[in-house]
Image (tube, rainbow, N blue to C red):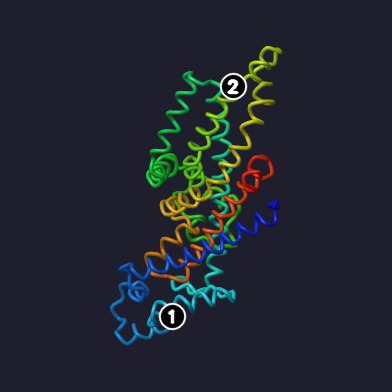
Amino acid sequence: MKVNAGNFILKKLIKLMTLLVAICILTFVLMELSPIDPVTAYVGASTKVGAEQRVLIAEHWGLNKPPVERFMSWFLSLMQGDWGTSMIYRRTVLEVIGQKFMSSLALMAMAWVLSGIIGFALGILAGIKEGKLVDKLICAYCHLLISTPTFWLGILFMMIFSVKLGWFPVAMSVPIGMLAEDVSLLDKVSHLILPALTLSLLGVANICLHTREKTADVMRSDFILFARARGESSRSIVYHHVIRNVSLPAITLQFLSFSELFGGAVFVEQVFSYPGLGRAVVQSGLRGDLPLLMGIVIISLVFVYVGNLMADLMYQVVDPRMREGHRA
């Protein structure tokens, strides 16, 4: 029986729904087992809140109900399109996520494009110059990046480019004290560059090393030897043979890096106080905002899953052997 594209996507959607339910249950259980008291996290350090008020707060947010009842109530509301209300922001979860996600999306999109372009270019150069000084320097640079913690790199960039040189703002996504209607596009971009550069460098190493290996394999192949024998120039060989053969695996690897991109965004947004989804997930976890945390978990899972699905679809379209594998 042949598996068409519709069945392939249907299977993926069923897997996604199953994974969503499992992740939601696991997240809820972990939050229940955490030592954070949501009521204490909600009132903060205030000593003016008495025991009766704490009971009323717990009753208002439904925290006095048994865990199973609370989870089922939240899950049934989710099925009806109600994602709940954030305890931190006092707004609906969908409204908070929509605002935060757009900020994070701009950051991750810029970092994703930069890491892809820089990593691919460096990988091509290293593969062509395999074994030479340029190749060794690029490989050493990539291994150094892999072993560098995200937060440390962000702090280093902030000290150099913001504090020492003053080229970029220190933190936040807009100037402090400025009204939203007064913030220009240039202001937003200037606050976005340094976090995006930090996040992009972390993704450069993987795509560079992978592209380097593919490029080196192509350069050692017989058809490259034949092309040289025909008198093709090095530039023509790179453009007509190397780039075309290694670009698809590199693009696929980029789509598979969505999870690393989102994980890196959490650290980068914390370091630069960037008000995105990554910073919101840390705040919701530390302050026991379960509706917001569950909503972000769902969105982040869908985001990563879509990246993996796009990579799978590209292989299905381009490589016939993958389609044969699924049929078997």
x, y percent for residue 138: 47, 27
Residue 52 higher or lower than 290, as above or below: below
Mark 1: secondary structure: helix
Left or right: 92 in relation to 46: right
The residue at the far bottom in this view is 52
Amino acid residing under circle 2: Met
Residue at the image point whose x is 48% and y is 74% from the top: 90
Residue 48 higher or lower than 298, as above or below: below
Mark 2: secondary structure: helix
Q: Label 2 crowding class (10 Å Cα cut-off): few <14, some 14-19, many 20+?
A: many
Amino acid residing under circle 1: Glu
x, y percent for residue 81: 59, 74
Left or right: 200 in relation to 322: left
Write down the residue under mark 1. 69
Whether residues under marks 2 and 1 lie with C-beta atoms below 8 angstroms apart, the answer is no
- CA distance for labels 2 and 1: 62 Å
Q: Which mark is residue 199?
A: none
Which badge, 2 or 1, comes first in the chain's sequence? 1
Left or right: 239 in relation to 177: right
x, y percent for residue 153: 40, 42
Residue at the image point whose x is 43% and y is 37% from the top: 145
Residue 194 higher or lower than 79, as above or below: above
Q: Label 1 crowding class (10 Å Cα cut-off): few <14, some 14-19, many 20+?
A: few
Label total for image: 2
- When asked about the image quadrant of residue 148, the answer is top left
Relative depth, front residue between 180 and 285: 285
Residue 144 higher or lower than 190, as above or below: above
Relative depth, front residue between 70 and 202: 70
Write down the residue under mark 2. 219
Relative depth, front residue between 214 and 104: 214
x, y percent for residue 3: 68, 52
